[in-house]
Amino acid sequence: MKSGHFAGTAVATVMAISATSAFAQSRDQIQVAGSSTVLPYASIVAEAFGENFDYPSPVVESGGSSAGLKKFCEGVGENTIDIANSSRAIREAEVAACAEAGVTDIMEVRIGYDGIVFASKSDGPDFTAFTPAQWYNALAAELPQDGAMVANPNTNWTSVDESLPDSEILAFIPGTKHGTREVFEEKVILQGCEDSGAMEQILEINGGDEDAAESACMAVRTDGLSVDIDGDYTETLARIESNPNGIGVFGLAFYENNTDKLKVATINDVVPSTESISTGEYPVSRPLYFYLKQAHVGVIPGLKEYAEFFVSDAVAGPNGPLAAYGLVSDPALAETQAKIADLGS
């Protein structure tokens, strides 16, 4: 995800176009699973959908982007989910797994943008400003030193940078099943490795193997100072409340709805906000998606209507309830609306 902000072609993209046999409908409730970042947005839409349409409210579950896409790719039919929410783009391997199970007509729908923020207890240490390089030096499993890779010796934020608080490193980061983790690794840890000059040193050590160097950069320490959170952001918040010196990785929207408990840090001196994300100034932001199983359109009642409602101006536009919760509206929303309108035609 190193392309320009809001760059890209069609938002709702048919990723494969071979036909899938229809199945008999025997449930009338849309089933959704996936990203914990997208969960609150999908829950808002599902509730409003049930109130405004003659269809039952969709069932929306969390579990993480990877887990949701795995369920999505289990097959076609009433016993499989209709939509997977994701805070990252679907991977080629997942598209292949879907195809093997007969899921070949997948529509990618970008719903908007969100930022990844670093927040700590409101009355905790003065974690108010970071750079990607500082996060790399704090959380990397190994660092280059004197021509070799050594276990990360940093255990206190002051040993990373004297300007940071005198506090033991304790970071609560998304577990590997979450799409947020991939963005965190690429846009924070890998970027920090490059910014700090460590990437260049690692390439000298390993003989110029760029793939291996990237992997070494993004390998996170496992000595207890970095803690993977497999649950959603409420679990991260609970960990910080019981470990006041800790700092957590959150979605901007979650932070903005918990400012009474958390304070947020800048990244490269930029305050995370819907405005700084929409302009591309804030460096740690990402698009949010849902993936729709086109073979279920016209079979599961209300599926197309739900997708249309989700990306309507009234819901996903800059003055809608999703923006009120913290979603940065997609400037290309009209393209998405047009793609979904053509579903089943």
Image (spheres, rainbow, N blue to C red):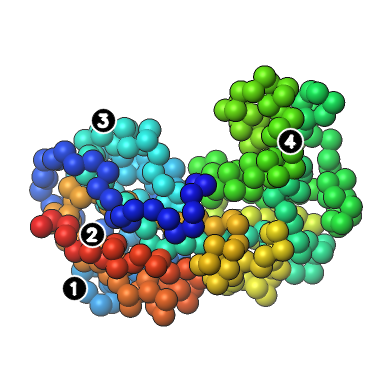
Q: CB of mark 4 within 8 Å of CB of mark 1?
A: no
Q: CB of mark 1 within 8 Å of CB of mark 2?
A: no
Secondary structure of the residue carrying tag 1 is loop
Task: Say left or right for 16 vs 71.
Answer: left
Task: Say left or right for 174 vs 106.
Answer: right
Secondary structure of the residue carrying tag 4 is helix
Residue located beneath label 4 in the image: 198
Q: Amino acid at mark 4?
A: Ala
Q: CB of mark 3 within 8 Å of CB of mark 1?
A: no
Foreground label between 2 and 4: 4
Q: Residue at point 20% right, 50% down?
A: 294
Q: Amino acid at mark 1?
A: Asp
Residue located beneath label 2 in the image: 339
The mark that comes first in sequence, 3 or 2, is: 3
The mark that comes first in sequence, 3 or 4, is: 3
Question: Which quarter of the figure has residue 58?
Answer: bottom left
Q: CA distance from mark 1 to mark 2?
A: 23 Å
Residue 189 is at least partly visible in this image: no
Residue located beneath label 3 in the image: 100
Residue located beneath label 1 in the image: 54
The mark that comes first in sequence, 3 or 1, is: 1
What is the x, y in percent for residue 219?
65, 34
The mark that comes first in sequence, 4 or 1, is: 1
What is the x, y in percent for residue 55?
21, 69
Q: Residue at point 38% right, 33% down?
A: 93
Question: Which quarter of the figure has residue 191?
Answer: top right
